Image (spheres, rainbow, N blue to C red):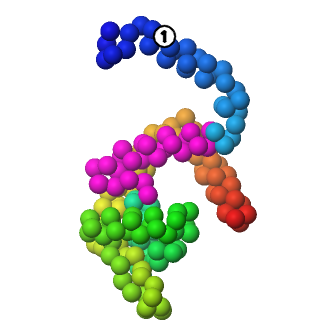
Amino acid sequence: MRNGCDARCVSWRLSTIEEFNQMTVLTDDVGFLLSRASGLVVRGANAALEEHGLRVRQYSVLCLAADTVEGVSQRDLAGTLGLDPSQVVLLVDELQTAGLVERRPSPADRRTRLVVATGRGREVRESAASRARADLRHRLRALSDREQETLTALLARVVTTAESDD
């Protein structure tokens, strides 16, 4: 017995994998495949971002804040990321505590706070982006560059259409 798993456990795992491979009901389901692929990519990205103290959602907020000179509102962050505004508040709080972003009043509307990447936040974003890209390349290694471009374009269309329905 190794790590609490005997031959029966190994046999069960192998039979489960074989059964899974035969379950075309799920493997032919685009929703299932999208969800499964998303989970795998997010887990890989989280592992790649860990050395920077980030997870995918924090990294996404940091990227959006770093890509604008004037900053981005928390409301716009929530809309772009498809998150509840309360989730964005928590993410920004975490990034602000880490010194990666700061909140500034909007010159156009004093009630609105803009999230702006700090100098350190921009540096971390660049380094983290490199790690995240490398992990994604690894995850998508079964696809050619052209297939990856096609996948990206198709997913963007799906997201745009689905968002317009909401």
Disc 1 secondary structure class: helix
Q: Is residue 49 magenta?
A: yes
* Horizontal relation, residue 44 to residue 52: left or right: right
x and y percent of residue 92 in the render?
38, 68
Who is closer to the viewer here, 55 or 151?
55
| Residue 80 image position (x, y, % from top left) | 55, 67
Question: Type of residue at label 1?
Answer: Ser
Q: Nearer the viewer, residue 111 or 45?
A: 111
Look at the image and say whether residue 165 sits in the magenta stretch. Answer: no
In x, y percent, where is residue 20? 60, 23
**Quadrant occupied by the N terminus:** top left
Q: Residues within 10 Å of mark 1 (few under 14, many from 20)?
A: few
Determine whether 21 is above or below 139 in the image: above
* Vertical arrangement, residue 54 with respect to residue 34, above or below: below
Q: Write the residue at 36% across / 44% down.
A: 47
Can the viewer see residue 78 in this picture? yes
Residue 69 on image: x %, y %:
41, 79
- In the rendered view, tell whether residue 35 sits above or below residue 156: above
Left or right: 91 in relation to 25? left
Dividing the picture into quarters, in which one does residue 129 lie? bottom left
**Magenta stretch, residue numbers:** 33-57
For disc 1, the marked residue is 11
Res. 146 in view: no
Residue at image x 27%, y 67%? 97
Within the image, what quadrant is residue 160 found in? Answer: bottom right
- Classified by dominant secondary structure, the portion drawn in magenta counts as helix
Which of 133 and 98 lies nearest the eye of the viewer?
98
